[in-house]
Image (tube, rainbow, N blue to C red):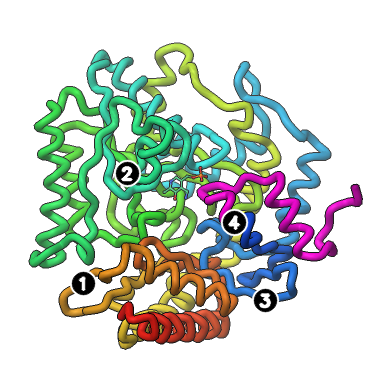
Amino acid sequence: MNKITNHMPTAELQALDAAHHMHPFTAGAELAKKGARVITQGKGVWLTDSEGNRIVDGMAGLWCVNVGYGRHELGEVAKRQMDELCYYNTFFQTTHVPAIALATKIAELAPGDLNHVFYAGSGSEANDTNIRLVRRYWDVKGQPERHIIISRKNGYHGSTMGGGSLGGMTPMHQQGGLPIPGIVHINQPYWWGEGGDMTEDEFGLARAKELEDKILELGPEKVAAFIGEPIQGAGGVIVPPATYWPEIQRICQKYGILLIADEVITGFGRTGNWFGSQTFGIRPHIMTIAKGLSSGYAPIGGSIVCDEIAETVGGAGDFNHGYTYSGHPVASAVALENLRIIEEEGIIDHVRNVAHPYLAERWKALEDHPMVGEAKLVGLMGSIALTPDKARRAKFASEAGTVGLRTRERCFANNLVMRHVGDRMIIAPPLVIKPEEIDVLIERARKSLDESYAGLKADGLF
Ligand code: PMP
């Protein structure tokens, strides 16, 4: 067979893809009929496909390409590291400079006493580590019955058995025997969809109180930890009411329960601070990180762990857990260079002072569209709720997600990557997006909304 390259006809690439590549979170047979879009290049916020289309990536890949595509420095660092030391493990009393340097840098950036890094290859793996780490912590503390972890419905914490169990995604729990025992879910702080007649603030407190109720129902002596994303990403960019996190923090503190902030999306500048916990005033014992840690240039994740947990677990013999690629030297070197770029180029200042304010005004203006209920934006993480009736925050009569999917299809046709989660549209562009690129993103988003609206009317769905 000839070498497979970008220069092959799209249909041939699609046929080979359909024959041999199983896509994540995808109906394989359906995609095989349609053919996957073949992405060939990336530069800044722009993608190119095999047909030569130039696409604005409003999702930074999967919320990860924070510094934008095509930064050659990252490739240079990877090459240098591969030449020097392509791999070595950190299991058997060995270490190496990339793992040391990255952990030191992460400890410097992370707030409070989050001074220790346990490396993983992804966000899912890091959350699996967290399950084992918090249970081990309570074992060592002489409280082995403290093993239950509380998380939220419609939260996302990855797709491994542990990560998928921590997450509260019903379609995932319906496949493969999830959740594993010892993980329970409370309701999410989704005011737009579930807030009823309450104000946002009242609702935030009510949903936080569910944590206290659940702790009391289970018995505080059985609860190890609570985990949540500062802003739910995959659940639809659900920004919690301002009252929510302070109350969650208070409850965790009151019952001595460990708090894990899953910062896989919100970490490394996404919300306009290094971490989403800083944006929301959360003081976690552990943070989960991945994605923006390397801007997606290399697969790497980890847990940032506070002194107390690291010292307790570290002082009690072997912690029997780890991955071949924990602290992989190439991934670590790439991540460190990525953090250098974010810091030295002032990318987080750019989010706060340029990109967020510019996008916020235009994003909010989409609320004048007949189909848009609310438009939310924190840093560069945004969502719009599609609705047939804004005043009532109503849902569409069609099956949930129909309107979102149709709108996403229009975005796709207009060369904008904007995702849908049910009937919410979401964005998280690379943090380096410039005002003139924001103009293009908004212009394409509005055009897609208009076309979707016209189509729905024509089909009698609006
Ligand atoms: N946690 C959160 C909050 C995420 O958004 C994701 C990925 N979308 C994960 C964990 C899992 O990360 P990964 O896909 O790298 O395993």
> Of callouts 4 and 2, which one flags the residue occurring earlier in the amino acid sequence?
4
Q: Give the residue type at disc 4.
A: Leu
- Identity of the residue drawn at 67% across and 48% down: 334
Q: Which is more foreground, mark 4 or mark 3?
A: 4
Q: Residues within 10 Å of mark 4 (few under 14, many from 20)?
A: some
Mark 1: which secondary structure? loop
In percent of width and height, residue 365 lies at: 35, 86
C-alpha distance separating marks 1 and 4: 32 Å
Mark 2: which secondary structure? loop
Whether residue 118 is visible: yes
Q: Give the residue type at disc 3.
A: Arg
- The residue beneath circle 4 is 31
In percent of width and height, residue 343 lies at: 56, 60
- The residue beneath circle 2 is 168
> Of callouts 3 and 1, which one flags the residue occurring earlier in the amino acid sequence?
3
- The residue beneath circle 1 is 394
Q: Nearer the viewer, residue 106 or 266?
A: 266
